[in-house]
Image (cartoon, helix red, strand yellow):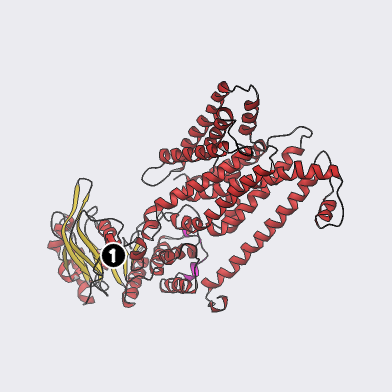
């Protein structure tokens, strides 16, 4: 099977700081990957590398065997949709106008949206259950609604891979469960997902793979069960879980239930 | 096409919004024609609107005096007002989209100041070189507008954002500097008084009596600018998401930025060449329409062009009649209307805009 994305020996420096070295990884269709690591370790940077927004300092990121540097942003955006953590817009665009922007990579220089575009938008909004928000102003939405609408924009790109940067941020527990369900729905739609996640207890059940970034080590990859071990997490997050036995137990119980 | 559209609410919305826009365009267009007719009739010599309308369709004849007043004096001036209003409003719309900031306008961000400096350089230093009244003057106005906006943009932006405070301060400083530096050129004025008079009118924003060739040139610049804005409008929508996101979606931010600056400066220069420094028009017109139509630039573009023309035709007619036989520079009038409106916006939107 052809990988959607390949990291081939990728290194990335952010100014003086070296974030990645010799990163090798692949994303296949139907993968649902949680990207885990402490703040500032480079989760967002990694997502940006996959989206082609940043170029690696060394090595190569490939989309279906083609180097991302050789592709136009338009072409990448038809396969890979990046949903950023924060979107600030200066004017009160409606939700519908916001989601329509997802068709930008498909538009011709002078053309407007055609029926196929509207169909994609409609589908994206149906999947994210945002049709009822169509005429609301994006800037006036609640955190949970905003998150769903941002994903709708990504889905309007009809991507094969969806990159989610902290999709659980600012969500209450109920909205977090909704978001997890939505990610599950998208996975079942056949869209590969790579999402940076902070709340480890939400990972199992939906995500099939965990990428664990820790300081000064190579990125680890494996099933949630393999990766969410107290020992590994303690190293990755530079903290002691021994003083929080209930948290560990809680996580383990939920994992076992899910499996 | 339309028959294929499904009846989901998301899609159905589109039809109603579009027809709303068409209605607005039709209303604006008829108001513009009406205001031009009324403006043509008003003045020291009154020409009844009915007579104008009838003569337009060949039902009655105008006297020679009336004909001279209309074609040599009033119509050129009315058309000039329409062109200036349109140019300023559309460039205001473009700059607001580019700066991602509803408070940008050619006057506030200093591009009209640059255009005035360029134009006065033309008037004072190379007055002999001119084609149909401008030529070098219009070219220098264009260069001045572009130079000052690049300067303001560079001064005000950090990390791809232009915070409103930085924008307003940089724009204010640059525009004041440029406008006043025009006075230095007075020293170089060999033709005492003549150039100064032209300059002083410009700084107050007065629509002089243009010749038909001048109108043609400015009309051409406006048409060119409007045509160039059409493909930019949709990109400005995407740019509202932020530069990085827009880049991801396949917009070439750099190209769009350059295109907006060139076209916005062209429109500003066209307006300044005819009307000098007319404040706030480019700010309030796009803003009012955004309240009615929403922020979609594709939808805003044609209505902004029409509403800007309408606004300045009405304002200029008022300016030349309210204290007749004396005449008020229209820039003074727009400052009195636009200034309070600008302050109101600043207060109302402080929280959302000043962040």
Quick one: B64 or A45, which is closer to the camera? B64
Q: How many marks?
A: 1
Quick one: B107 or B209, which is closer to the camera? B209
Q: Which residue bears the numbered disc 1?
A: A195
Where is B84 relative to B22, above or below? above
Where is B183 relative to B241, above or below? above
The answer to whether B311 appears left or right of B156 in the picture is: right
Instruction: Specify the quadrant of the image occupied by residue A68.
Output: bottom left
Where is A83 relative to B320, above or below? below
Asked if residue B109 can be seen in this view, the reply is: no
Q: Which residue occupies 44% across, 73% down?
A: A120
Q: Which residue occupies 54% across, 76% down?
A: B5
Task: Categorize mark 1 by other alpha carbons within 10 Å: few (<14), some (14-19), many (20+).
Answer: many
The answer to whether B262 appears left or right of B25 in the picture is: left
The answer to whether B148 appears left or right of B293 in the picture is: left
Quick one: A131 or B256, which is closer to the camera? B256
Q: In which quadrant is the N terminus of chain B drawn?
A: bottom right
Instruction: Specify the quadrant of the image occupied by residue A127.
Output: bottom left
Where is B208 relative to A153, above or below? above
Q: Chain of mark 1?
A: A
Q: Element type at marker 1?
A: strand
Asked if residue B267 can be seen in this view, the reply is: yes
Residue B234 % position (x, y): 49, 59
Q: Is residue A131 magenta?
A: yes
Q: Which residues are magenta?
A: A128-139
Q: Is residue A177 magenta?
A: no
Q: In which quadrant is the C terminus of chain B drawn?
A: top left
Residue B343 % position (x, y): 57, 40
């Amino acid at each position: 099977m052809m990988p959607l994305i390949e990291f081939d020996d990728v290194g990335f420096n952010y100014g003086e700081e070296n974030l990645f070295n010799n990163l090798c990884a692949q994303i296949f269709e139907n993968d649902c990957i949680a990207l885990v690591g402490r703040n500032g370790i480079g989760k967002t940077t990694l997502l940006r590398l996959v989206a082609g927004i940043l170029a690696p300092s060394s090595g190569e990121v490939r989309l279906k065997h083609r180097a991302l540097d050789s592709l136009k942003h338009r072409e990448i955006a038809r396969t890979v949709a990046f949903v950023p953590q924060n979107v600030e817009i200066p004017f009160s665009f409606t939700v519908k106008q916001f989601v329509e922007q997802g068709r930008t990579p498909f538009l011709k220089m002078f053309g407007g949206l055609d029926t196929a575009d509207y169909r994609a938008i409609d589908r994206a909004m149906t999947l994210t259950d945002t049709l009822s928000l169509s005429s609301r102003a994006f800037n006036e939405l609640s955190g949970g609604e905003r998150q769903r609408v941002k994903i709708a924009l990504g889905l309007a790109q009809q991507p094969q891979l969806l990159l989610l940067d902290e999709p659980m941020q600012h969500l209450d527990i109920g909205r977090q469960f909704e978001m997890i369900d939505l990610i599950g729905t998208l996975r079942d739609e056949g869209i590969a997902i790579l999402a940076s996640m902070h709340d480890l207890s939400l990972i199992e059940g939906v995500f099939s793979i965990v990428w664990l970034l820790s300081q000064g080590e190579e990125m680890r990859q494996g099933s949630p069960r393999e990766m969410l071990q107290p020992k590994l997490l303690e190293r990755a997050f530079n903290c002691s879980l021994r003083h929080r036995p209930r948290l560990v137990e809680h996580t383990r119980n939920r994992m076992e239930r899910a499996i | 096409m339309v028959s294929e559209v499904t009846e989901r609410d998301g899609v159905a919305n589109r039809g109603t919004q579009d027809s709303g826009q068409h209605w607005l365009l039709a209303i604006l267009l008829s108001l513009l024609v009406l205001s031009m007719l009324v403006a043509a009739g008003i003045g020291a010599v009154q020409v009844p609107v009915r007579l104008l309308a009838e003569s337009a369709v060949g039902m009655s004849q105008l006297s020679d005096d009336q004909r001279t007043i209309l074609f040599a004096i009033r119509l050129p001036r009315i058309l000039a007002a329409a062109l200036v209003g349109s140019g300023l409003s559309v460039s205001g719309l473009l700059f607001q989209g580019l700066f991602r900031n509803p408070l940008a306008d050619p006057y506030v961000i200093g591009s009209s100041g640059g255009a005035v400096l360029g134009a006065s350089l033309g008037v004072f230093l190379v007055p002999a070189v001119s084609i149909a009244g401008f030529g070098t003057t219009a070219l220098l106005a264009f260069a001045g507008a572009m130079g000052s906006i690049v300067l303001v943009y560079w001064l005000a932006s950090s990390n791809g954002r232009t915070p409103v405070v930085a924008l307003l301060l940089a724009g204010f400083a640059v525009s004041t500097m440029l406008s006043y530096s025009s006075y230095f050129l007075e020293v170089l004025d060999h033709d005492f008084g003549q150039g100064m008079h032209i300059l002083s009118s410009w700084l107050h924003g007065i629509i002089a009596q243009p010749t038909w060739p001048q109108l043609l040139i400015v009309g051409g610049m406006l048409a060119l600018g409007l045509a160039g804005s059409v493909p930019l409008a949709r990109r400005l929508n995407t740019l509202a998401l932020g530069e990085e996101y827009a880049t991801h979606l396949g917009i070439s931010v750099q190209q769009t930025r350059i295109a907006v600056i060139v076209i916005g400066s062209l429109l500003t220069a066209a307006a300044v060449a005819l009307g000098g420094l007319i404040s706030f028009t480019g700010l309030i017109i796009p803003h009012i329409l955004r309240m009615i139509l929403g922020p979609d630039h594709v939808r805003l573009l044609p209505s902004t062009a029409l509403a800007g023309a309408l606004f300045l035709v009405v304002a200029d007619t008022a300016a030349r009649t309210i204290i007749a036989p004396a005449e008020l520079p229209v820039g003074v009038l727009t400052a009195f209307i636009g200034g309070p409106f600008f302050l109101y916006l600043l207060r109302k939107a402080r929280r959302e805009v000043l962040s």
